Image (cartoon, rainbow, N blue to C red):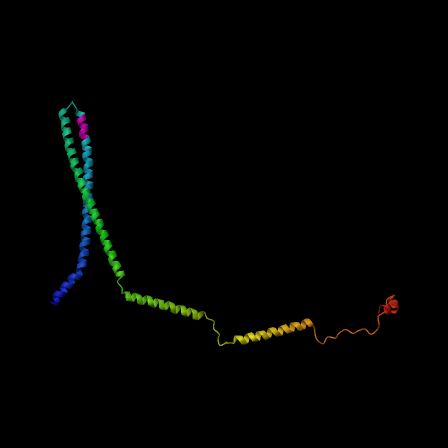
């Protein structure tokens, strides 16, 4: 029983290969048949050209003899009729062969199209042959790594204090003191030094101007 199962399994697995071989052989047979039909068409076309020339020759010969040699003219016309009949048969044969060749070419084209579509379907199936849970896990890992990279970038961009953790309020108070000292210094420079002596009052009386004694002696007592 086991051997029978093995034989059946091997036959099942090898069936696609046999199908591919049969399809490839049928394709080559179709191509060979198409080529033979083309060769036959070429041969019949040459026979057509030969018969057309013979018909023209026999017609010219019948016209040449005319009434001078009726028997020869009639024989020429008979041969012309036989050639014309052969030409008609070849025309019909060519039409049949052309139709058959077109049918084979269309069938071969359809076969190739279906074969390529089958290959494409297999490739698409193989490309999509994955577990959706694995895809979700992969996307979650990518998101986690992106967040980790963002945290690392933020940590690197922060300034490093190297233990110099000072109180900002103390620094502002010290700055205010320095500004006040500078302001006091500027005020002292504007007012001048406190020890600078004032100018002395002259001890001698100023000389009198002309007419000043008259005003002091006569007019001043009257005004006062």
* Residue 127 among those drawn in magenta: no
Q: Main secondary structure of the magenta part?
A: helix
55 lies above or below 150: above
Along the horizontal axis of the image, is 156 left or right of 73?
right
Q: Going 18% across and 56% down the picture, which residue do you hit? A: 19
Q: Going 18% across and 25% down the picture, which residue do you hit? A: 64
Residue positioned most to the left? 1
In terms of depth relative to the viewer, which is nearer, 130 or 187? 187
Quadrant assignment for the N terminus: bottom left
Numbered marks: total: 0
The image quadrant of residue 211 is bottom right
Give coordinates of residue 218: x percent, y percent.
88, 68
In terms of depth relative to the viewer, which is nearer, 1 or 143? 143
Give coordinates of residue 184: x percent, y percent.
64, 74
Residue positioned most to the top? 68
Q: Going 19% across and 54% down the picture, which residue do you hit? A: 23
Give coordinates of residue 20: x percent, y percent.
19, 56
101 lies above or below 77: below
Along the horizontal axis of the image, is 107 left or right of 141?
left
The image quadrant of residue 91 is top left
- Give the magenta range: 57-63
73 lies above or below 167: above
Quadrant assignment for the C terminus: bottom right
Q: Going 21% across and 47% down the picture, which residue do you hit? A: 106
In terms of depth relative to the viewer, which is nearer, 82 or 4? 4
């Amino acid at each position: 029983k086991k051997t029978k199962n093995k034989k059946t399994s091997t036959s099942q697995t090898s069936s696609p290969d046999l199908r591919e071989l049969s399809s490839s052989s049928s394709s080559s047979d179709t191509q060979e048949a198409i080529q033979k039909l083309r060769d036959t068409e070429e041969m019949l076309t040459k026979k057509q050209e030969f018969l057309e020339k013979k018909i023209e020759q026999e017609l010219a010969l019948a016209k040449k003899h005319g009434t001078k040699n009726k028997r020869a003219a009639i024989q020429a016309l008979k041969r012309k009729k036989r050639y014309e009949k052969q030409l008609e048969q070849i025309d019909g044969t060519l039409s049949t062969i052309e139709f058959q060749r077109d049918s084979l070419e269309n069938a071969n084209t359809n076969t190739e199209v279906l074969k390529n579509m089958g290959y494409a379907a297999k490739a698409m199936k193989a490309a999509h042959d994955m577990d959706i849970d694995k895809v979700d896990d992969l996307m979650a890992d990518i998101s986690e790594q992106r967040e980790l990279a963002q945290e690392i970038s933020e940590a690197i961009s922060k300034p490093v204090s190297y233990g110099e953790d000072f109180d900002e309020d103390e620094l502002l108070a010290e700055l205010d003191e320095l500004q006040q000292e500078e302001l006091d210094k500027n005020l002292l420079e504007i007012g001048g030094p406190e020890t600078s002596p004032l100018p002395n009052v002259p001890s001698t009386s100023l000389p009198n101007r002309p007419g000043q004694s008259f005003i002091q002696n006569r007019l001043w007592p009257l005004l006062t």
